[in-house]
Structures are given as C-alpha cells and as structure tokens.
Amino acid sequence: MKSYFVFSLSLHLVIFLHSSTLTLGQTSASAPAPSGPTNITKILEKTGQFTTFIRLLRTTQAGDQINTQLNNSNQGMTIFAPTDNAFTTLKAGTLNSLSSQQQVQLVQFHVLPSFISVSQFQTVSNPLRTQAGDTSPGDFPLNVTTSGNQVNVSTGIVDATVANTIYTDGELAVYQVDKVLQPLGIFGSPAPATAPAPATLNLKKKSPAALTPSSGNDNAPADYSGADSVNGVAVLGIGVLWTLFWLRR
C-alpha cells in the first residue's frame, strides 16, 4: 500500500513537471520579437500625414540612405518633416519642375547629420549644417531661433515652426514642421540681369561752323555780301595805282 502511494505520487509529480515545461515553452514561443532597425518611412507612416514627404524619400532613395546611416553609425540624426498641408502651400507643379538632383537636395536640406533635442536648439550655432549644405554651404543656409519652447526655422525664403515632436530616441529626432524648407540654392530668385553700359559721350571738338545755330532754313541762299565788299576795295586800289603810274610818265 505504501509502495503504491509512493508510485502514484511520483507519477503525478512527473505529469506536473511535464505539463509546466510545455506551458513555459508555449509562452516563450509567443513572445513578441525584438524591434527591427530604425526605418524613417515607417516612423512617418504611423502618423498618416506625411504622404508627400514619404514619396520624396522613396523616389530620391534618400530614405534608404538615412536608414543606413542611422543603423551603421553613432552620430545620430535630426529630421524636419513637412506635413502634406505644408506641401499644398507650394505652387502647383513645383516638385515636378525640379530636377532629380534638386529633389535629392530638397530632402537632404531637411536632414541634420546629428541628433539635436528641443532644448539643444537654444544653444546651437547658426547656420546649421544640413546634408545638402556639404556641397554648397552658401546656397543652403538654415537658421533656428527659439522663444521659450517654440523653435522657428528660417531658410532665407520661408520661416517655419516646429509644431510637434514625432519621434525621438536619443539618436534620431523627427520634428513636424508647418512649411516646406525651401533652400536659396533651389528656390532663390535668379541673379539680376547685367545693366547695359552707359552711353559714351562724344567730346570731340566741333568746328565753329558746326556750333553756329542754324536759321531753321537749310535751303536759304548763302550771304556773300562781305566777300563782295572786299573785292570792290581791291579793284579800286588797283585803279588808283594805275592812274599814278601814267601821271608819272
């Protein structure tokens, strides 16, 4: 009887341990997988108001470059993301009128190659370096100013406001802006046309006849009265000399 009780107890213990092992295994298998690498387009897709910016990230392949940099370096990154409403303020056809290179530069102008928190905007030095500014710094100036907790971004063409923090993890910061950041190098006014050279004054000295005002009648006969008087005096003198010559004979 005692042996049967020990055997029964042992059997129940084995069944309990086996059952517990199965339960733990099932719980482990159903646990969520760890999050994957950072993906900027997936971050923006969650909000549902960055369709145009996401399309630019994909068509220019700038999104893939951002993801590669984020997952293979420790420098961090800051992105200003314009909403769909921000793109509607552009003139119709603006994006289509840009070349492929200009579209890439436009996206890169919204990306800073370092992580900047909201509080750090109060101490950064202007102009900020963007990924587009590495090639032509003078054409892509980006300046920020702060007033309390408000951050304003200026490009020399538009003044935008950071309206919301979409994502931040200490390495990547994504901020919503209410306007598309238009760089001078793409949207700046064309250089003014060269002014024509001033007319050269003709300072050549003119003859007295040319400076004499006209009587207004170009066909009027010339006045030779002065010349006739001179000729008369000459004839009279010759006559007097001829008379004296004959008197002396």
Image: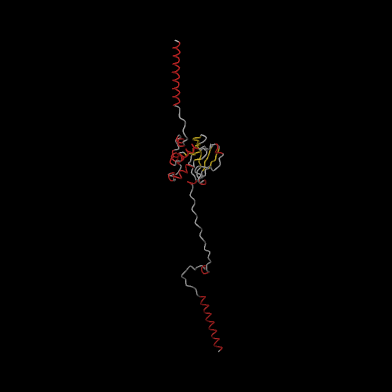
Q: x%, y% of residue 23?
A: 44, 22
Q: Please tell me in which quadrant of the rendered image residue 51 appears.
A: top left
Q: Residue furthest top?
A: 1
Q: Nearer the viewer, residue 237 or 21?
A: 21
Q: Is residue 100 above or below residue 201?
A: above
The quadrant the N terminus occupies is: top left
Q: Whole-percent x and y of residue 66?
A: 48, 39
Examine the rendered structure and indicate whether residue 192 appears above or below residue 32. Answer: below
Residue 247 x %, y %: 55, 88
How many labels, in total?
0
223 and 127: which is toward the camera: 127
Q: How is the image coloured?
A: secondary structure
Q: Nearer the viewer, residue 205 or 80?
A: 80
**Vertically, is 15 above or below 42?**
above
Quadrant of the rendered structure where residue 54 is?
Answer: top left
54 or 22, which lies in front? Answer: 22
- Quarter the C terminus occupies: bottom right
Q: Residue furthest bottom?
A: 249
User: Residue reaching furthest front?
Assistant: 3
**Left or right, residue 50 beside residue 144:** left
Q: Position of residue 173 (x, y in %)?
A: 51, 36
